[in-house]
Amino acid sequence: MMKPRSDAQHICYRSCILRQPYNALHDTDLTRNLQHEIAQGREGSGISSSMARRAIRQIEEPVVSMRVLIVEDSEELADLLAKGLQAAGYEIDLLASVSDASSVLGTTRYAALILDLGLPDGDGLSILRELRHRKDPIPILVLTARGGVEDRVNGLRSGADDYLVKPFAFDELVARLEALLRRPGQMLGSTLRLSNVTFDTDGRQAFVDMKPQNLSAREIAVLELLLRRKGSVVSKKLLEDQIFGLTGDVASNAVEVYVHRLRKQLLDIGAKVKITTIRGVGYVMMESD
């Protein structure tokens, strides 16, 4: 008979084995239990030091990952989509109209867009056409009740990368989104490497010389974007959009602060990479000399 897991082992199982973010567990008792198991020794517990500390980080601070915009006027469906995709590891912003979406997409960069077509102030196809007219490459998944062949063809020819008809299976939606983000030039890939620095995007864990490093959620977000665009300039605006999204006012020097912290940490732990500031443009990560 299998021995029941302790609270701490359950957290580790969820966050480190299943790779599920434990954002709902802002529970100091569970955190203390996990810290106690680390302090008392883990012999026979099945919890490694790196797994335990990663689980604590998942409880104590939010995971910052790829940010997706959902444009959906059904409040109930939008809420369900947001909760499901957050559980799958995405950061989500929600909008409900053509006008709001057009305004936000004109100034904010997202990893992907999930778009309803029947919106209260217009047709979602107008957003598609506008984005493609200005050569915006954002991956777009249309999620709509319009299921006719002509509708699907029209949506794809208007610029959608994929088209899913309601009602739908949520697992299929996630799989389709992952497929879009795996395409060349997009933002999904399980392991990122540059010199002796490795980043596991599933576990949200950075390694230097194969040793796990303790970085904050914001520092990890900066590292991931720089590694995805290694050798190319990443604009300050893109970093700001992916880290903060529509979360409100952001201090003008917030990105600089997190880049500075990450640069210092990487230097201190012997990472053979450097982050160069391109004044007035952004940042680029390259192998150090």
Image: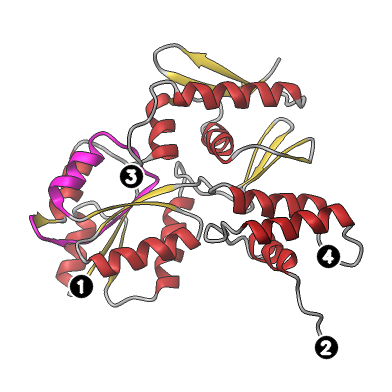
Q: Could you say where residue 119 lies in the image, as x and y percent from the top left?
A: 13, 60
Residue that numbered label 1 is attached to: 145
Element type where label 3 sits in the image: loop
Element type where label 2 sits in the image: loop
Question: Looking at the rendered structure, which numbered label has been put on residue 46?
Answer: 4
The answer to whether residue 48 is seen in the rendering is no
Q: Which residues are magenta?
A: 97-121
Residue that numbered label 2 is attached to: 1
Residue sitting at the far front: 29
Q: Residue at x 58, y 38 (%)?
A: 220
- Marks 3 and 4 in Cβ contact (< 8 Å): no
The answer for how far apart the CA atoms under marks 2 and 4 are is: 16 Å
Q: Earlier in the sequence, mark 2 or mark 3?
A: 2
The answer for how far apart the CA atoms under marks 3 and 4 are is: 42 Å
- Closer to viewer: mark 4 or mark 1: 4
- Marks 1 and 3 in Cβ contact (< 8 Å): no
The quarter holding residue 279 reads top left
Residue that numbered label 3 is attached to: 138
* Depth order, front residue of 222/4: 4
Q: Residue at x 38, y 22 (%)?
A: 252
Q: Earlier in the sequence, mark 3 or mark 4?
A: 4
Q: Residue at x 34, y 38 (%)?
A: 109
- Give the answer, above or below, for where 25 lies relative to 65: below
- Closer to viewer: mark 1 or mark 2: 2
Q: Earlier in the sequence, mark 2 or mark 4?
A: 2
Give the quarter of the figure containing the N terminus: bottom right
| Amino acid found under the numbered disc labelled 4 | Gly
Q: Earlier in the sequence, mark 1 or mark 3?
A: 3
| Amino acid found under the numbered disc labelled 1 | Ala
